[in-house]
Every structure is written in C-alpha cells, then in structure tokens.
Image (cartoon, grey):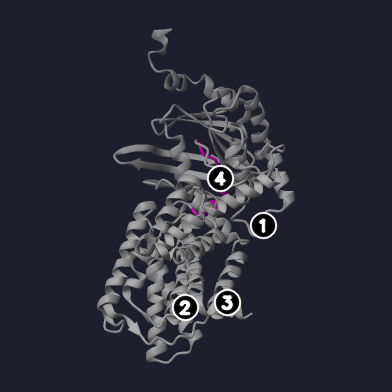
Amino acid sequence: MLTLENVGVRYGGVDALRAVSITVETGHVLGLIGPNGAGKTTLVNATTGLAPLASGSIALDGKRIDGLPPHRIARAGIARTYQNIRLFSALDVRANLAAGAFARPGRLTPEELTTLLQRAGIPHVDPAAKAGSLPYGDQRRLEIGRALAAAPAVVMLDEPAAGMNPAETTRLVETIRAIATAGIAVLLIEHDMTLVRAACDSVVVLNFGEIIARGTPSEVARDPVVVEAYLGTDAGALA
Amino acid sequence: MTALADFYAKHSRLIDQIGVNAILALSLSVSLQAGQLALAQAAFAGIAAYVSAILAMNAHWPLLASIIAAMLVSTVVAALLAFPVRRLRGVFLAIATIGFGEIVRVFANNLKITGGAEGLSGIPNDATTPVIYGALALVAIALFFLSRTKFALAVALVREDEYAARGVGIDVGAIRTLSLALGGAIAGLAGALYAHASFFITPSDFGFPRMEQILVWCVVGGVTSPLGAVLGAALLSILPEAIRFLADYREISNGIILLAVILFAPGGLASLWRRGVVRVRS
C-alpha cells in the first residue's frame, strides 16, 4: 500500500503539487487524471525520488520512502513506466527484462522470462530482438514487463495507452486488471476515459497541482468541477 | 626456431610495448563501456609507473610487490577522482579528466622524488615478455568473467540510460565509481609494467598525447568491445614500425586510420567482425 500525505512539490516559484493525499491499495487500480500540466507525472516523479518534496510524506507499507535516492525507492518495491518510453533500446528484450529484475537476488530464469512476456501481453516477442526495433505498442508493453520483473509492490503506469489504437487499448485493460489481481497496487495515469472507466477501481482528479475530485470513475465523470477543468468555464457558452 | 628467436630478438621491445598498450586500451575500454568518457588512464598509468619504479629503486621491492602496490595507489586515486566528477558527463567529463591528467604530469615534472622533467632512470628491467603477456591474459580472463556478472549488466544499463537505470534500482554513482576504479587498477598495471620494461620513465610518457593514443586505439577497435580495444592497440602499435620508410611522416598512420574507421566503420574493427558474422549466418 502506497500512501502520499499532504505532498507538495515546488519547481522554482511554482507549486507543481499542493497538499496531495492519496492511497494506492494493494490489488486496486487507482486512476490519476487531469489536464496537461496538472502535476500527474510530477506525482510519479515525487514518489520515485526524482522530484524532491517541499512538504508532506510518502510511505510504502507504513515505511517512509521520501528523501531516499531513486535507486533505493525502486529497490523498496516501486516500479514505473515512462510517458516517453525509456527502454534500454540498444539492448535486447531479455536484457531489458533482466534490468527490471536487477534489484532482485539471483538472475532472471527462462521460465520467468516467458511468464513476464505473457503478463505484459507480448508472448510473441523474440527475447533476442532489440528493444528499440519492436513496434511502438510492444515497446510500451515491454516497459510494463520490465516494471513487473522487479516483483514490485506498486506499479505506476504513466500513460501506457499513449499512441495505441482502440483495439490495443482494450487489450491493455486486461493486462492492467491482471497486474492488480496479482496483488500489486497500480497507479494509472491516463487521458483516455474509456480506459480509465474500464480499468480503474477509483479515480483521483488533479488540476493545477491540487486534487479537485475523487471517487469511482462514473462519479468523477459526472462531477461538474471535473467537466469544467477539462473543458473550461466557457464550454457552456461555446456550445 | 632460430628464425623465431631472431625475430624476437629484433622486435622484443615492440612486442612488449604491444602487450602494455593492449592492457592500457582495456583500461579505457572499461570506463567507455559504462558510457564514461573519462580520459585519465595515462595519468593513472603514470602514477603507478612512478610508484612501482620508486619502490623498486629506493626500497628494493620485488617486481610483484611493487606492481600490486602501484595498482592499489592508482585504483584509490581513480576512485577518489570519481567523486569531484560525479555530475559531469560526455565532453565535460573528458575535459575534467584530461585536466586531472595535466595536474599529474605537472607534479611529476616538478617533484624531487619523481626526478623532475628528466624522470627516473635505472629501473630494474624485470618485466619480461612472459610477465607482460601473463598480465594481459589475467586481465582478459578477469574481464571475461566479469562480463558474465550482474555488474556488467549494470554497467551496460548505465551506459544506455542512467535515468532508467536508476528506475530499476541501480546506484548509478556507485557503478560509475567502480568502473573508474577498475579502469584505474588496469591502467596502473600497465603503467607499472611499462616502468619495469623500460629502463627509464619521464613525465611526458604519460601526458595528453599518450592519452589521445589510448583513445584512438579504443575508437579504432570499437569503443564497447574489449577485444576490439586490444586489436586497435596492437594494430596501431605495429603500424608506425611497419612503415618506417616514411621517416618523420609515419605518425600520420594513426590519423589516417582513425579517420577511415570513423567514416567507414563507426563501430570500430569489432563491428566489422560482428557484421561479418551476421552475414555468414544469414
């Protein structure tokens, strides 16, 4: 279980995050939505140690992790994917999954490799293929596989459906639900509301670094504050 | 047999140099593999050369003991250097480490114990051809076994993407320090052997031109391939000897080969070999 309490992050004079409190529970998928620049990726960066906190605390299963260097936070059990794919693209698929498993004792076995490719939804991919040579959707999924290779307690997916077609996005829902079912806490950053509705147990909405709404996906979608944040106050006038 | 003995007698100096140069090339290859353009190998070798020479001449240490002590010193110096340059990458790291090399050279030029600009002479000439090639073999074997460990995976990940490497739990700073220290140890071995294979050493033996030579060997061989580094060092050590008839112009061979490799085989000699293997297989 990942707990953020009153987390604030400042970039220069700007509050990128202000008093954000969320809990990502084991076995659940929490959606994090909001307009561009709302602070979604900043929240992931703060949790993974890439953005220092100005206030608040972050704990994994009750143990404080804020202030630790990024590699220690990864080792504590938090894995992530990136909005812009960050695979080790010159290395092969096997090495990328072995990289994900780096912090675990021992080496990645061939059985584990097969299982990871299956869980990531890319069983057809050749483990000896260069990661950078894979089709875009497979690269996104390989990043998910790399995150799972760490046997993490929490997985943070930063726009995993970006650049995918509707059919691929539908398949992605199964992949994400299966990750949660396996006993992992999942935080899903996403713009695609169809994916959010299908994959998330609950949703938190960020705008200008603050939480403006939370609830089930359908509650949030009906919330006038959320509609306004997405479409602007003049939306009614324009329509 | 006599023909071989004659050949050795005639070229033993060059043969020894090739062995030492191959070890130097391997030392740089280690930090290049971690994506670190750290160009202080000549200085590490120089420090070790002076330490082992001074221990052998003044304290009468035996060869092995003086080499080990020299390697310890160069390893520690390399690990310490990793700290001030920890935030530098690419060309900035290269410039800072070249600067460090110049500092070492200036100290060697001015200190009493290093004999100043004239250097040290009368070093016991006990690093024989078998000793040098035995050391090269040991380094090669050690690097081979190292290449199969998780450390080698971490090194490759740091080279490919430091940011993502942190994300999978790798302590990038530690990997950088370790790879620089390992490079320092191997360069130190080469430096100590150099001192014990030459009757004398001077500060200019370990200056920037030497560092540039080591870099050229690695680029020609292939920056991420240890075997390529050894090949590059061997080829470019032999070549100036093979074209002696060009007299003072023979040193252009380094430049010409470097240009040719960068233009036609950017991955170095090792990549030609790999491409060949792929072609034969398919």
Answer yes or no: are tags 1 and 4 on the same subunit.
yes
Q: Quadrant of residue B76?
A: bottom left
Q: Chain of mark 1?
A: A
Residue that extends furthest to the right in the rendered view of this protein: A111
Q: Amino acid at mark 2?
A: Leu
Note whether residue B39 is visible: no
| Neighbours of disc 1 within 10 Å: few (<14), some (14-19), many (20+) | some
Q: Report if the CB atoms under discs 4 and 2 are less than 8 Å apart.
A: no
Of the residues shown, which amino acid type is indicated by label 1?
Arg
Mark 3 touches mark 2? (CB < 8 Å): no
Which x, y percent locates residue B78?
41, 68
Query: Label 3, on which residue?
Result: B134
Mark 4 belongs to which amino acid? Ala
> Residue sitting at 56 percent across and 54 percent down?
B270
Tell me the distance, in whole angstroms, between the alpha carbons under discs 4 and 2.
37 Å
| Residue A107's disc number | 1
Q: Tell whether position A186 is magenta.
A: no
Magenta stretch in the rendered image:
A71-83
Residue in the image at 42% along x and 50% along y: B259
The relative height of residue A215 versus residue A155 in the rendered view (above or below) is: above
Residue B30 percent coordinates (x, y): 50, 62
